[in-house]
Amino acid sequence: MKPQELKYFKKMLNERIDELIKGAGRTVSEMAGEEEVFADPNDRASQESDRNLELRIRERERKLIFKMREALQRIEDGTFGICEECEEPISLQRLKARPVTTYCIECKTREERRQKMRGLTSVPSMSFAE
């Protein structure tokens, strides 16, 4: 991969990590400031549901940050953009769409098929007697 392409991905990944961390900080400060007392239990339940959704989103973002940091490490190691399975270059279009990917589209498609087949064969049979 060309140095200017690596520089592009490094900058993009770092900027996205910064955005996600700032968003998480805002969530923490907003949640710390929320001490409303609700007369209606439905309002309280709605707030709890919203809070749980926000926390699930932040957990997914935390995992994404981890993957982005791994991608940055691959840039440093010289392995960014190389498929882990076939060791061929991953297309720039794929990397732009999903810079944390470690598989080319062909290998990822094969892996998803294998996972799907394993998932279908490992489903326990259902009995009506249960």
Image: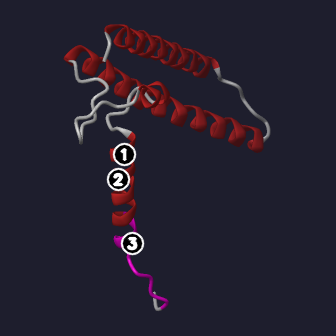
Tag 2 residue:
110
The kind of secondary structure element at disc 3 is: loop
Q: Amino acid at mark 2?
A: Arg
Q: Is residue 61 left or right of residue 78?
A: right
**First along the sequence among labels 2 and 3:** 2
Residue drawn at x 35%, y 38% is 104
Which of the 4 quarters of the picture holds residue 71? Answer: top left
Question: Label 3: few (<14), some or many (≥20) within 10 Å?
Answer: few
Looking at the rendered image, the disc whose residue lies closer to the viewer, 1 or 3, is 1
Q: Is residue 114 left or right of residue 19?
A: left
Instruction: Tell whether position 60 is magenta.
Output: no
Whether the residues at callouts 1 and 2 have beta carbons within 8 Å, the answer is yes
Residue drawn at x 54%, y 33% is 57
The quarter of the picture where the N terminus appears is: top left
At which x and y percent is residue 81? 31, 26
Tag 1 residue:
106
Please give the range of residues in magenta: 119-128
Looking at the rendered image, the disc whose residue lies closer to the viewer, 2 or 3, is 2
Residue drawn at x 24%, y 14% is 76
Distance, label 2 to label 3, CA atoms, is: 20 Å
At which x and y percent is residue 53? 59, 37
Residue 128 in the image: above or below residue 107: below
Distance, label 1 to label 3, CA atoms, is: 26 Å
Tag 3 residue:
123
Q: Main secondary structure of the magenta part?
A: loop
